[in-house]
Image (tube, coloured by chain):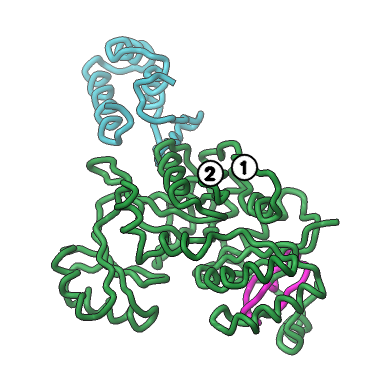
Amino acid sequence: MGINIGITGLHATDNPAPGIGVIRSLRHPAGWDGEIVGLAYDVMDTGVYDVGLLDHTYMVPYPNQSSDQIFDRLMYIHNQIRLDVIIPTLDSELPLYQKLEQQLKEAGVALFIPSKEISRKASKSYIAEFCAENDIPSPETFVVKEPGEMEKAISEIGFPLMVKGVFYEAYLCHTRSDALKNFEKMKLKWGLPVIIQQVINADEFDVCCVGDRDGNLLGAVPIRKTRITEKGKAWAAITLKNDELYKLSQKILKKLKWAGPCELEILKEQTTGIMHLIEINPRFPAWIYLCTGAEQNLPKLVVDLALGRNSKPLPPAKSGITFVRHATDLVCPIEWLENMTTLGELHY
Amino acid sequence: MADVFKSELTLSENGFLFDHNTGLTYTLNESGQFIFRKIEDGKQANEILELLLDEFNVDENTAHKDLDDFYRQLKETGLID
């Protein structure tokens, strides 16, 4: 009997969600022995219309809706198409799935995600504290919890500085007015706190990692983004063989006892060579299929971990593997749109 | 790979050089590829100069300058100390 997997994050336009790369990885290289179930938030989530990607799609309520309502919907799906594992792929879903983890487990649906306590340590608001406690270099950071603290943050950090939203987005600011304007923007869009961070003259690297909850790093693919969009999202990158990045990733995941996938954003200072941890994104990156291309299938590893299968560290990823993101048009019959709109589900 | 390089490097037949550690890539011309291969083989600068003179139709000053330029660029890009 195959394993059925529910996956979120199916929308891939200018800022793609990771779900599609996760599904392509599961299906790599010879298909998936089970059903792949898309959990869509919007009728127009683009992955829904990618022929051959999904076996079924169901609309689910947004993660900010009541967890009872979401649980009921997941149980409706579970009763129709048994869900063995769910892989959430969006930052904003983590608190919801942390809340539902036990209930889902009791219903026979497995997850492999970090606990609330651990993901809090790794969040933008607490990462500087985590780094300081564990002797991991990180840029000077001021977490602005109320507007009155902004002046103090500016004088402590100095210019240039980064103004970062608590969930997404970051702006480089060279002047006080710039910083105040972007602080207001981030506050309105994502709420408080807003993170003010020192700018370091450095090369940026990312590492996609999977931890086993006991402090072991089971998979790690370091990359350098070679082209980015205006929003800073990679549309081309190359995999690396870099021991320093590997050792730092190992240390971070060990200290956190991280469970499941994450993306580490690391800066290497050009003058000193010091590596700074700037962010931990608690999910797969949108470029996850690059890891699969580099011979580390991290989504399959997460499925094994969720199912409690014995999992060992994967052999090193291949360096020099490149990806480019390529936009294309998908066409589909009107019935697909009709089913998604009226029934909230689609069976291919 | 000679230890002289600070990173694992791969040079293709077309002169495309990839640094596995940083992800940076470079394109080497014919003489650059020649010098790179000789460094890789563990040859010293004075030996490479002789080999350059044997291989290419250049005078000693030009070969010397090319070799110095190449070593300078390797240093600037952090590929050697």
| Residues drawn in magenta | A39-58
Q: Position of residue B76 (x, y in %)?
A: 25, 35
Find numbered disc 2 in the image and state the secondary structure of the residue it sits on. Answer: loop
* Numbered mark located on residue A295 in the image: 1
Chain containing mark 1: A
Q: Position of residue A48 (x, y in %)?
A: 69, 73
The residue lying furthest to the left in this view is A155
Sequence-first tag of 1 and 2: 2
Front one among A270 and B76? A270
Would you say A268 lies left or right of A12 here?
A: left
Q: Where is residue A250 in the image (x, y as percent from the top left)?
A: 46, 43
What is the three-letter code of the residue carrying label 2?
Asn
On the image, numbered disc 2 is attached to which residue? A216
Q: Any idea which chain is the cyan one in this picture?
A: B
Find numbered disc 1 in the image and state the secondary structure of the residue it sits on. Answer: loop
- Residue under the image location 35 percent in, 55 percent down: A130
Front one among A337 and A123? A123
- Residue under the image location 71 percent in, 87 percent down: A341
Looking at the rendered image, the quarter that the C terminus of chain A falls into is: bottom right
Q: Any idea which chain is the green one in this picture?
A: A
Would you say A257 lies left or right of A175 here?
A: right
The residue lying furthest to the right in this view is A1
**Residue A54 part of the magenta segment:** yes
